[in-house]
Image (cartoon, coloured by chain):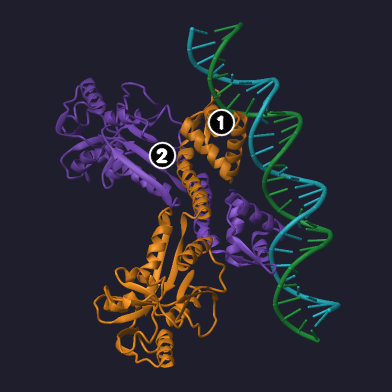
Chain colours: A orange, B purple, C cyan, D green
Amino acid sequence: MRLRQLECFRALMLHGTMTRAAELLGMSQPGISTMIAGLEHETGLNLFLRRGGRLQPTPEAKLFYVEAARALEAAENASRVAAEIRSGRRGHLAIAAYPSISINLLPRLLAQFASNKPELQIKIITRNSATVRELISTQQFDLAVAELPQDYPTSHMEVFSYECVCMLPHAHPLAKLKQITPDDLDGVPFVTLFRGDPIYQQLASAFSEYGARWNVVAETEFFSTACQLVAEGRGVGIVDPVVSKPFTEGLTIRPFKPKIQYQIAILSPTHEAPSQMAQDFAKLLRRGLRG
Amino acid sequence: MRLRQLECFRALMLHGTMTRAAELLGMSQPGISTMIAGLEHETGLNLFLRRGGRLQPTPEAKLFYVEAARALEAAENASRVAAEIRSGRRGHLAIAAYPSISINLLPRLLAQFASNKPELQIKIITRNSATVRELISTQQFDLAVAELPQDYPTSHMEVFSYECVCMLPHAHPLAKLKQITPDDLDGVPFVTLFRGDPIYQQLASAFSEYGARWNVVAETEFFSTACQLVAEGRGVGIVDPVVSKPFTEGLTIRPFKPKIQYQIAILSPTHEAPSQMAQDFAKLLRRGLRG
DNA sequence: GAGCGACTATACGAATCTGCTATAATGGAC
DNA sequence: GTCCATTATAGCAGATTCGTATAGTCGCTC
């Protein structure tokens, strides 16, 4: 049974005569005739009574029509879905990300990406960077974003490095400086990430190197929390200049010396081929992470 | 998009390699290869990654597979339904019939007919004969059974004539007779159909012809009601020998002179071609009505 | 690195299918 | 009878299908 036969059959049932069905399908009347003859032969059903050169659908044809139409629709649907997949209107994106990025930057980029993709299904899982790294190796995600360092290299990785900047509350005296060093922050109340974080360690080294006193008044898990504390005037702090940018509205930002490096990476699964969808989004994400 | 392509695609997705898919489908490996290449070209999707001479389904392939499998199943279902229709296992029968026949004989025959037809849908509508005759002309029924006379011949008709028989309650004195005439029933309590019925009129003529007194003690609408009254000893009566046979169990049946004729007919719609199913059942019904 | 095994891709040819034009056949309307 | 609308058949060109033969790729083993 061929789809073309079913198509001819449907057109014939809907329009009554072969001549009209042929017009509708853009083919010749004899073409329809042979198609129908073939279908009748293959199914073993007498679909039409030939009465005086005219066709009359038999009750069997009406019964069969229901199923034929259903099969045709399913096939047409498959074609449509193929087109949707091809054009990127259909698909799914499962993304694992660490909190700071999944609070603002990631959903913003995803919303933009999905705006012209009616059938796109999005799944975002937020975990700390270590867990995200484990998750991507389960091959259940299309993409992941985690902070470095990567303890074991399970997946393809694309690294983004940032030099952290110093953030000051509104109208802070240090705002007059072009650039800030540990010397400037000697004894100044400071908000930082937890001890385990690479940023913490780099800052500790920097202050000790400059011989300045690092006056930590708060340790937070996320950049966003730290930013909020700074905004409330609790102290100054350090953040990356891109991912955390949305949290530093209204704060004064100055370059920080020495360089405090913050590294994150886009991770992709290794065993699976990435979907076109994932590749497209990765492109957008890449642009977003370049700042 | 051809069904064969989807079939190859499904086999390939399910079995991983073209070689195995080809075995399963009973074709050659190059055959599968070209089929898949064609499907990829037509859908515009990269369904498989060629890595080192092996195939790896892409995420797009997995998305498309869902719809492809659905379409294939629908097509296979259509084929199966065609086979069911052809072999008479699927179809529907809409039958209109008058009460006496639809109480017992018709459902008995239908049950027998349907016993090996799992997908047969049956619809029985019971109306008086005049209404049945109107219904058949609406072309909504495959078959109808009504009593004659047919007032206007709207449909194809197959007539069955019966000579009515006399029924006597159990152990009735007249049971000793081989045959019963109006003379024998002179003044005997009699149960009959209503005045409008042809049977009533024929009986009236018969009794008056024989100069016997027709002692009607009850008029009923249906044969079955009349039979029950006779069984209760309320009187004697007359019924047709075939349709009403199931109601006369335990009663004594004797031929009746003169002939009281009872005619019914199988009616078929004129405009519609009868379904094979209807024709098959008509054959069984015909045998049943011949007694 | 050569050989082997498992796999896929391409080339080519035969058979089949598709769908066209031309034409025959049928039946209804006038 | 003639015209008109319809379906069916024949014959042909082109496309599709699917086989065989063959080449290419990769991983494994020795």
Q: How many C-alpha atoms fall within 10 Å of the one at disc 2: few (<14), some, or many (≥20)?
A: some
Please state if B159 lies on the left or on the right of B246 as rendered. right
The quadrant where residue B266 appears: top left
Q: Assign a secondary structure to mark 1.
A: helix
Residue flagged by tag 2: what amino acid is it?
Answer: Leu
Q: Is residue A94 above or below residue A135?
A: above
Residue A132 at x, y percent in the picture = 44, 78
Going 36% across and 39% down the picture, which residue do you hit? B94
Question: In 3D space, how far apart are the residues under numbered discs 2 and 1 (Cα atoms)?
Answer: 42 Å
Nearest to the observer: residue A258 or residue A129 = A258
Q: Is residue A43 above or below residue A91?
A: above
Residue C27 at x, y percent in the picture = 54, 18
Please state if A79 lies on the left or on the right of C11 as rendered. left
Residue A227 at x, y percent in the picture = 31, 76
The subunit carrying tag 1 is A
Nearest to the observer: residue A205 or residue B65 = A205
Q: Is residue B286 above or below residue A285?
A: above
Please state if B276 lies on the left or on the right of B106 as rendered. right
Residue A53 visible from this viewpoint: yes
Location of mark 1 (residue): A22
Location of mark 2 (residue): B285
Going 36% across and 47% down the picture, which residue do you hit? B108
Residue flagged by tag 1: what amino acid is it?
Answer: Ala
Residue A44 visible from this viewpoint: no
Q: How many C-alpha atoms fall within 10 Å of the one at disc 1: few (<14), some, or many (≥20)?
A: many
Please name which of the two marks, 2 or 1, marks the residue nearer to the observer.
1
The quadrant where residue B234 appears: top left
The subunit carrying tag 2 is B
Q: Assign a secondary structure to mark 2.
A: helix
Q: Is residue A147 above or below residue B101?
A: below
Query: Total label count?
Result: 2
- Same chain, labels 2 and 1: no
